[in-house]
Image (cartoon, rainbow, N blue to C red):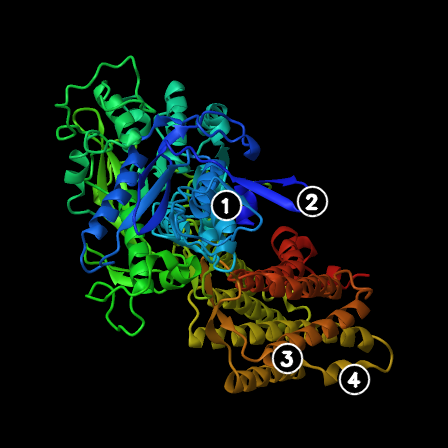
């Protein structure tokens, strides 16, 4: 496949096939012959001479323009490493290493053209009978160092894969290139983007940036990076406000569109994954619309770009950039090597001549013709030197990509050393192992196998080895900080080792110019006491904060759920902590307790007043009628009924719980028993008026009446005694009612006992009502049976309504309902029975006569 792409094939007749080499602009490169020649591909220029990508129309003579100082340093890092290895007596002894370095101009077709020229050799023609294998006299290379972008590296690796030519990239970081089955011949000295993207994701999570914009290159480098970023932040509450893509071909319009998007977005942190030249154009567009308050997260492709850092036009926009950078290292002697470069000493180096013309504004004056010499420039004096020049080319303070190139050359050299060493020699590379195989017989597939086994110590003393296509990941964390002069400087603030992040937060200067971490979120984090409620149709980072319900809390910021408090606890007013529930009961101090106490005391007072009235008028017919003893006993029982309600108010205790139900049950049975006996007496008196029934009233005299009341009451006493002895009510915290207070009440340990007490009262009341109803039409002028009938109707109605109200009332209100029932029934009995009598006694004494009472 590679030779099909690298050769233009034409048919001449039926049996004859000729081909010619797909040419490469040899003038745009750097060349050094040797026993073994390795290839190099770099983006030396960034402006190709045309925009047409048609493979059949690639030029053979038009050069690229726009010399880029930074990649030029990478070129000479490779040259320096080769020369250093050639001087090394232990690594590849007796073998001279050469290089053929071509300019890809940042275009994959140019890189592919150069790569195929490198592996195809320098023959200008061939025919079908020629061997497709490498032959002596060609400058066919067994290995290429290059692929400055991931897209280019993918194309080159797939093309060179069938030929098994190893490709070592110093800058292609796409995770896709780690796929060994697809790219078996690919290696790199830069870590996979997975590690730098994970570091950026950790930074976003660490600083609580949940609303982030992204601007990425529209290629594998940018698109794959943003995909990994989303995967790493999934579940951490980080959302992307927007994703803008940049294309190199349409950089002006794309950068303008991205700048307007950044301006319109509420995201204050912007993640940028693209080449530094794209970032430069984006920053210029942002500067035009005065967007200078964004915090940028930089990928390694531009986080250390001196061109951007030194650009005063965009310094306000770029202030505070926080980036992941390729780890920096030093190459001993490299700075001196660069500063000693001179066109006179490198007469065949046209790239150096072009750099010299751009730097000093003069022509080096060597023998013409020069590809890049400008006739309009004056000749150089010869005193020009790079010794005092300070620019990106000569700056070796922090070597990053250049060091990756340096490592790639050494990796190739160690693999070649291992391949060429004697088979019986056990000496590791780096010691005096002899070279036995011929450099001319090197097969790329054998070199590929030895590259997979490289495990050496670099001249800088660090271990170097490949893990598949990759090396162990190490990064620097850098920050662009303002200087007093108004420029920016690069400051090291941390490092990344694999997946571990080590950061000095106090050393960071943010885009605001302070040490205050910028805030970038669609919605502010929900404070404790609230929960997150996502907005329908919006990202999860955009939400509302809903207060927790009563009895629930959230004690962390940004909680998605409110946790219910345990039964014994309740939430505080801020819904942040669970506090013990306050003990609540019906007390004498609260309004309800005071009201019920007043009603009970008033009832007892009125009953006492009626008792005094009856005692004062005990000799009158109204009092003496129907057994005055029962009337006095009824008044006493009513007073007890009023007073027993007071026992239900106050803090429940063991004895009050027992006493209140007993006092209630016995008092009401005594009261209803008196009414029942009174009703029986009325009926007996009516029946005794008939002929032959005189004996009936004699058999139910005062003694029998008192005995009946005692009998009925004793039954209730026995029920209460058994109930309270076997399973009495006990004080208990009522946790069933969810509220800030827990009710302390008397819990019925035995519902049967309480039901028997109420049931017996109900039985007596119903019997009394029935008897009173039968005696309601007695012919006497003052018929007490009517009064008893009305009183018992009220009594029964109150207690029938009491049961559902008692069951459904929450907390202390169950006690209030029972007290209300006691007071209502007691007042009903008091007023229905004694109010008419007191009216006659006090206000109508003329009717308080035996004649009037017995009149028909």
Q: Is residue 135 above or below residue 630?
A: above
Residue depicted at 53% across the width and 50% down the height: 130
* Circle 2 residue: 14
Marks 2 and 4 sit apart, C-alpha to C-alpha, by 153 Å
Q: Secondary structure at mark 2?
A: loop
User: x, y percentage for residue 573?
Assistant: 41, 50
Q: How many marks?
A: 4
Marks 2 and 1 sit apart, C-alpha to C-alpha, by 33 Å
For the residue pair 181 and 554, the one nearer the viewer reads as: 181
User: x, y percentage for residue 503?
Assistant: 26, 49
Q: Residues within 10 Å of mark 2 (few under 14, many from 20)?
A: few
Q: Which mark is residue 695?
A: 4
Tell which tag, 3 or 1, sits nearer the viewer. 1
Taking the image as drawn, is residue 73 in sight? Answer: yes
Tell which tag, 2 or 4, sits nearer the viewer. 2
Which one is earlier in the sequence, the residue at label 2 or at label 4? 2
Which one is earlier in the sequence, the residue at label 2 or at label 3? 2
Q: Which mark is residue 756?
A: 3
Marks 3 and 4 sit apart, C-alpha to C-alpha, by 36 Å
Q: Which mark is residue 155?
A: 1
Marks 1 and 4 sit apart, C-alpha to C-alpha, by 130 Å
Marks 3 and 1 sit apart, C-alpha to C-alpha, by 95 Å
């Amino acid at each position: 496949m590679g030779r099909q792409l690298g050769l233009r094939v034409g048919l001449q007749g039926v049996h004859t096939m000729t081909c010619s080499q797909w040419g490469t602009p040899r003038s745009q490169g750097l060349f050094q012959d040797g026993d073994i020649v390795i290839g190099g591909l770099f983006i030396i220029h960034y402006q190709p001479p045309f925009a047409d990508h048609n493979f059949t129309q690639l030029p053979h003579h038009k050069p690229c323009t726009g010399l880029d100082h930074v990649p030029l340093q990478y070129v000479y890092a490779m040259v320096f490493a080769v020369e250093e290895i050639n001087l090394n007596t232990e690594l590849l002894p007796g073998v001279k290493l050469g290089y053929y370095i071509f300019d890809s101009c940042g275009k994959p077709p140019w890189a592919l053209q150069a790569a195929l020229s490198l592996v195809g050799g320098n023959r200008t023609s061939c025919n079908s009978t020629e061997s497709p294998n490498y032959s002596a006299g060609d400058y066919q290379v067994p290995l290429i160092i290059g692929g400055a972008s991931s897209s280019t590296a993918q194309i080159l690796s797939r093309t060179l894969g069938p030929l098994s030519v190893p490709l070592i990239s110093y800058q292609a970081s796409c995770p896709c290139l780690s796929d060994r089955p697809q790219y078996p011949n690919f290696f790199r000295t830069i870590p996979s983007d997975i590690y730098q993207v994970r570091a950026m994701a950790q930074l976003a999570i660490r600083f609580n940036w949940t609303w982030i914009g992204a601007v990425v290159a529209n290629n594998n480098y940018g698109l794959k990076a943003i995909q990994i970023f989303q995967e790493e932040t999934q579940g951490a509450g980080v959302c992307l406000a927007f994703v803008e893509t940049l294309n190199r071909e349409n950089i002006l319009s794309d950068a303008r569109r991205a700048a307007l998007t950044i301006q319109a977005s509420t995201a204050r942190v912007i993640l940028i994954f693209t080449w530094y030249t794209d970032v430069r154009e984006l920053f210029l567009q942002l500067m035009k619309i005065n967007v200078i308050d964004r915090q940028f997260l930089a990928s390694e492709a531009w986080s250390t770009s001196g061109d951007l850092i030194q650009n005063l036009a965009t310094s306000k926009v770029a202030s505070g950039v926080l980036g992941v950078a390729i780890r920096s290292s030093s190459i001993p002697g490299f700075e001196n090597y660069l500063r000693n470069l001179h066109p006179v000493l490198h007469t065949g180096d046209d790239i150096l001549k072009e750099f010299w013309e751009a730097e000093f504004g003069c022509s080096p004056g060597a023998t013409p013709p020069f590809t890049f010499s400008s006739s309009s420039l004056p000749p150089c004096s010869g005193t020009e030197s790079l010794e005092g020049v300070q620019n990106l080319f000569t700056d070796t303070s922090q070597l990053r990509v250049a060091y990756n190139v340096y490592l790639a050359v050494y990796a190739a050299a160690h693999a070649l050393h291992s391949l060429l060493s004697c088979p019986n020699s056990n000496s590791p590379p780096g010691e005096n192992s002899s070279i036995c195989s011929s450099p001319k017989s090197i097969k790329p597939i054998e070199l590929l196998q030895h590259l997979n086994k490289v495990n050496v110590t670099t001249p800088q003393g660090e271990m170097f080895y490949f893990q598949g296509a990759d090396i162990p990941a190490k990064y620097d964390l850098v920050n662009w900080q303002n200087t007093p002069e108004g420029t920016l400087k690069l400051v090291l603030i941390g490092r990344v080792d694999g997946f571990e992040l080590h950061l000095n937060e106090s050393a960071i200067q943010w885009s605001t110019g302070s040490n205050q971490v910028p805030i970038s979120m669609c919605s502010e984090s929900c404070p404790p006491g609230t929960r997150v409620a996502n907005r329908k149709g919006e990202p999860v980072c955009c939400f509302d904060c809903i207060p927790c319900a009563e009895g629930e809390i959230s004690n962390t910021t940004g909680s998605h759920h409110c946790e219910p408090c345990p039964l014994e606890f309740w939430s505080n007013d801020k819904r942040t902590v669970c506090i013990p529930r306050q003990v609540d009961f019906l007390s004498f101090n609260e309004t309800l307790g005071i009201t019920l106490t007043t009603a009970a005391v008033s009832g007892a007072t009125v009953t006492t007043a009626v008792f005094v009235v009856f005692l004062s008028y005990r000799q009158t017919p109204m009092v003496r009628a129907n057994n005055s003893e029962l009337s006095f006993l009824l008044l006493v029982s009513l007073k007890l009924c009023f007073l027993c309600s007071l026992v239900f108010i106050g803090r429940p205790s063991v004895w009050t719980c027992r006493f209140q139900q007993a006092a209630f049950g016995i008092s009401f049975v005594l009261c209803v028993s008196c009414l029942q006996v009174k009703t029986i007496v009325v009926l007996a008196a009516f029946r005794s008026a008939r002929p032959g029934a005189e004996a009936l009233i004699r058999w139910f005299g005062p003694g029998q009446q008192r005995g009946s009341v005692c009998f009925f009451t004793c039954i209730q006493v026995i029920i209460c005694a058994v109930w309270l002895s076997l399973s009495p009510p006990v004080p208990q915290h009522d946790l069933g009612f969810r509220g800030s207070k827990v009710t302390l009440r008397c819990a019925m340990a035995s519902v049967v006992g309480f039901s028997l007490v109420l049931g017996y009262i109900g039985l007596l009341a119903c019997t009394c009502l029935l008897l009173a109803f039968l005696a309601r039409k007695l012919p006497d002028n003052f018929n007490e049976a009517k009064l008893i009938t009305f009183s018992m109707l009220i009594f029964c109605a109150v207690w029938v309504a009491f049961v559902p109200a008692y069951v459904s009332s929450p907390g202390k209100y169950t006690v209030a309902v029972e007290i209300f029932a006691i007071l209502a029934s007691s007042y009903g009995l008091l007023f229905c029975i004694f109010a008419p009598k007191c009216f006659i006694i006090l206000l109508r004494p003329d009717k308080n006569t035996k004649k009037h009472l017995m009149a028909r």
